[in-house]
Image (spheres, rainbow, N blue to C red):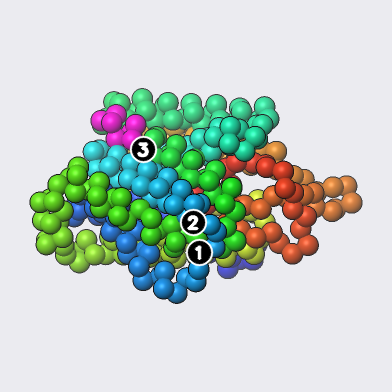
Amino acid sequence: MRPHHIALAVLVTALWGVNFVVIDLGLGHFPPLLFCALRFLAAAVPAVFFAGPPPVRWRWIVGVGLALGVAKFGLLFVGMHVGMPAGLASLVLQAQAVFTAAFAVAALGERPGRLRLAGMAVALAGVVVAAVDEGTSGPLLGFALVVLAAAAWGVSNVLTRKAAPPDALRFMIWISTVPVLPLLLLSLAVEGPSADLAALRSMDWGGVGAVLFVAWVATLLGFGGWGFLLRTYDASVVAPFSLLVPVFGMSSAALVLGEGVSPLRWCAAVLLVGGVAVTSFAGRPRRGRAGTPLPVPPVAGSRPRAGASVSRTPSTASRSSRTG
């Protein structure tokens, strides 16, 4: 990769890591489901008029919108609201790679090799260690909700793989239109109209800034930059940078929110990130003896590079973009 593209990849992962801190700050201004609805409302409404028509069929947009927007982000925001630390959330959410690989076995007929199974086991060991650490310092309910959010993200990754959108940013803009109404209805039913109205009436620049950051910076700018990189380089070159997200998430949470990182949490981070790396990238196609690239399936939301041979056979499951 060119140096300025490396800088872009690091910047995007930094934005996605810091996003967990901004979510934590935003939850001080809004109930979690209302905050999540405002995030997608701000992301979709201004952009949808300039995005062009949906890049895939509506059934995929609705399916991914419900799995990613309502289930994944709704559970994440509620989990952090009830006590899940921002830095730990950025780490545990990376377990989505394991869930993606597991769901792809049933939905896409993929068969993970022994190395990938070993990576899944190591990553799950990291989740267990993180659960033990959280159990000694905070409520386990928030931890459990974030694990469920990672599972919902795995479902959305498999749906995105099947949809195979040609434009990641335009796809993200359109799926952002789906969760707004369901999240608003859930907020009214669970959090109550009085809490929502009180939050909206007392909204200040801090609340507005939190909504705009998670909607425009982390979502639109982040996915725009990531999609550009995936259209410019092979996914095997770009995807490893996503492992920097929990690094930025945990470090920014420590700096801004004063979250401590215990030795047990460091152990969980090493196990989970290492296991996710093996799960995500084990068994990647290698170049043939003559230097000719072997068939490489496209990542959801990316386009194969010019001259690359594309296989129709389902392959690795966890190459979808990873965000907070």
User: Rounded to the nearest whole Å, what is the CA distance between mark 2 and mark 3?
Assistant: 28 Å
Front residue of 149/242: it is: 149
Q: Residue at x 25, y 52 (%)?
A: 184
Q: Report if residue 140 lies within the magenta region.
A: yes
Front residue of 30/115: it is: 30
Q: Which of marks 1 and 3 precedes in the sequence?
A: 1
Q: Residue at x 32, y 62 (%)?
A: 41
Give the amino acid type for the residue marked by disc 1 in the picture. Pro
Q: Is residue 43 visible?
A: yes
Which residue in the protein does label 3 denote? 146
Residue located farthest toward the bottom when viewing the structure as drawn: 50
Which residue in the protein does label 2 denote? 58
Which segment is the magenta one?
A: 139-145
Q: Is residue 249 visible?
A: no
Query: Looking at the rendering, in which quadrant would you find the N terminus?
Result: bottom right
Q: Residues within 10 Å of mark 2 (few under 14, many from 20)?
A: few
Q: Position of residue 143 (x, y in %)?
A: 33, 33
- Disc 1 secondary structure class: loop
Question: Toward which corner of the image does residue 43 lie, by quadrant?
Answer: bottom left
Which residue in the protein does label 1 denote? 54
Asked if the residue under mark 1 is in contact with the one under mark 2, i.e. CB atoms within 8 Å, the reply is yes
User: Rounded to the nearest whole Å, what is the CA distance between mark 3 and mark 1?
Assistant: 30 Å
**Residue 214: image tag:** none
Question: In the figure, 117 relative to 8: above or below?
Answer: above
Give the amino acid type for the residue marked by disc 2 in the picture. Trp
Figure label count: 3
- Does the magenta stretch mainly form a helix, a strand or a loop? helix
Q: Position of residue 160 (x, y in %)?
A: 54, 49
Mark closer to the observer (2, 3): 2
